[in-house]
């Protein structure tokens, strides 16, 4: 658990580091992030692309909203060569999330990232934060060393997948898709149980977790009703009890007209294997045949090997695995 991790030491802030000013720094930081993301497997995801776009075209409305733009930059001879951003986890108000840690290639291995991380930790501590969390690409040894030296410890990992649109790549045959049905309100406890198994608590520090999506509360139903059921759940019963009984698995599909990809989420019970996952995925993906042809995106936690096997069997390709890391802030 995060509470058992080592505490962050108090360290002075490097004189080259100053707070980010989006008005003055936005365009330069956007250029830096684009350069840094090109070095990562899969490039920037949709969230990263949104951050870059906001920085490049920072507006009075962004200033009024005032979220997601806290951070620090390293300035050398008037040039921004390093960046780190922070935002409070909306679902865990005691947690600050570090992101967009970037150093210009010509300035790497000079302590820039380390100094920026220290500034971010101090920022969280000064605002009574209890935890700091982040995500790093698995296999990025230099970044992992920086975070581990700062006291961060691995909490778990998730793999991000992308699949061409349903129109671009046909779905495999899966005879048991007929056993999948639309979720009902009576299924909410069973879906919640699947969610807590497939999304361990330690993975909700660096990635905001909206429990209402998995509890299927009245807000979820009302929101989807007024949004033409953009988000849907399909489930597979464990026995003949139907709604209200245990589930072998569930798949959530979300149609996105405002993002580059549609979203898919698969959750399987520990008792089932790859075939059950394939059946659920095929049933869920068929709804995208009626929508704008866009790629599909899915994030799946580790290990849950049956879920990963099912995703790859229906055409999802892994693009990156992110290690979630956390740090307990000193003084809590």
Image (cartoon, rainbow, N blue to C red):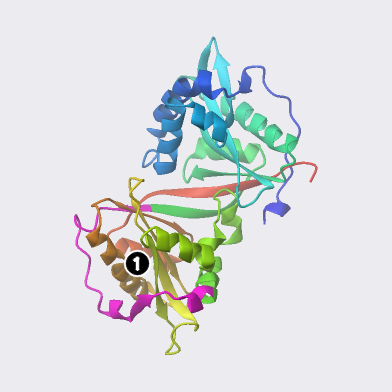
Any magenta on residue 165?
Answer: yes
Relative to 113, say whether 273 is above or below. Answer: below
User: Residue 76's image quarter?
Assistant: top right
Tag count in the figure?
Answer: 1
Query: On the rendered structure, is 123 left or right of 85?
Result: right
Residue 5 left/right relative to 312: right
**Crowd band around label 1 with a 10 angstrom C-alpha radius: few (<14), some (14–19), many (20+):** many
Front in this rendered view, residue 222 or 198: 222
Residue 102 shows in this picture: no
* Residue at the spot 39% in from the left edge and 58% down from the top edge: 227
Q: Residue furthest front?
A: 226
Q: Position of residue 12 (x, y in %)?
A: 73, 25
Q: Is residue 151 visible?
A: yes
Q: Position of residue 28 (x, y in %)?
A: 46, 20
272 to 94, vertically: above or below: below
Residue at x 54% of width, y 50% of height: 207
Q: Which residue is mark 1?
A: 310
Quarter of the picture containing the N terminus is bottom right
Magenta highlight on residue 303: no
Q: Quadrant of residue 204?
A: bottom right
Q: Which residue is depicted at the point 56% across and 67% down?
A: 196
Which range of residues does the magenta coloring cover? 161-188
Percent across and percent down for residue 307 are 40, 66
Residue 259 percent across, percent down from the top left: 36, 46
The residue lying toward the viewer, choosing from 260 and 146, is 260
Q: Residue furthest bottom?
A: 240
50 vs 11, nearest the viewer? 50
Give SS at disc 1.
helix
């Amino acid at each position: 658990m995060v509470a058992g991790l080592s505490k962050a030491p108090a360290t002075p802030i490097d004189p080259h580091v100053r707070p980010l000013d989006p008005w003055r720094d936005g365009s330069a930081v956007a250029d830096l992030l684009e350069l840094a993301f090109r070095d990562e497997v899969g490039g920037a995801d949709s969230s990263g692309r949104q951050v870059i776009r906001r920085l490049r075209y920072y507006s009075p409305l962004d200033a009024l909203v005032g979220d997601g733009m806290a951070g620090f930059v390293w300035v050398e001879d008037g040039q921004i060569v390093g960046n780190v951003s922070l935002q409070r986890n909306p679902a865990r108000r005691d947690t600050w999330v570090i992101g967009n840690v970037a150093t210009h290639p010509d300035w790497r291995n000079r302590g820039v990232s380390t100094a920026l991380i220290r500034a971010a930790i101090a920022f969280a501590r000064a605002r009574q934060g209890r935890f700091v969390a982040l995500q790093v690409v698995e296999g990025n040894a230099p970044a992992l060393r920086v975070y581990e030296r700062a006291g961060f410890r691995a909490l778990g990992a998730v793999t991000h997948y992308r699949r061409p649109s349903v129109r671009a790549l046909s779905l495999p045959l899966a005879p048991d898709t007929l056993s999948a049905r639309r979720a009902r309100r009576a299924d909410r406890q069973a879906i919640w149980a699947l969610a807590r198994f497939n999304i361990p608590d330690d993975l909700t520090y660096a990635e905001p977790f909206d429990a209402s999506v998995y509890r299927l509360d009245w807000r979820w139903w009302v929101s989807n009703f007024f949004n033409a059921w953009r988000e849907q759940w399909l489930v597979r019963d464990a026995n003949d009890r139907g709604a209200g009984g245990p589930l072998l698995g569930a798949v959530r599909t979300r149609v996105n007209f405002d993002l580059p990809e549609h979203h898919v989420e698969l959750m399987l019970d520990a008792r089932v294997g790859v075939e059950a996952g394939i059946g659920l995925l095929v049933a869920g993906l068929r709804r995208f045949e009626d929508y704008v042809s866009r790629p599909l995106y899915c994030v799946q936690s580790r290990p849950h090997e049956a879920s990963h096997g099912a995703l790859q069997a229906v055409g999802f390709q892994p693009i990156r695995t992110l290690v979630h890391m956390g740090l307990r802030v000193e003084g809590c």
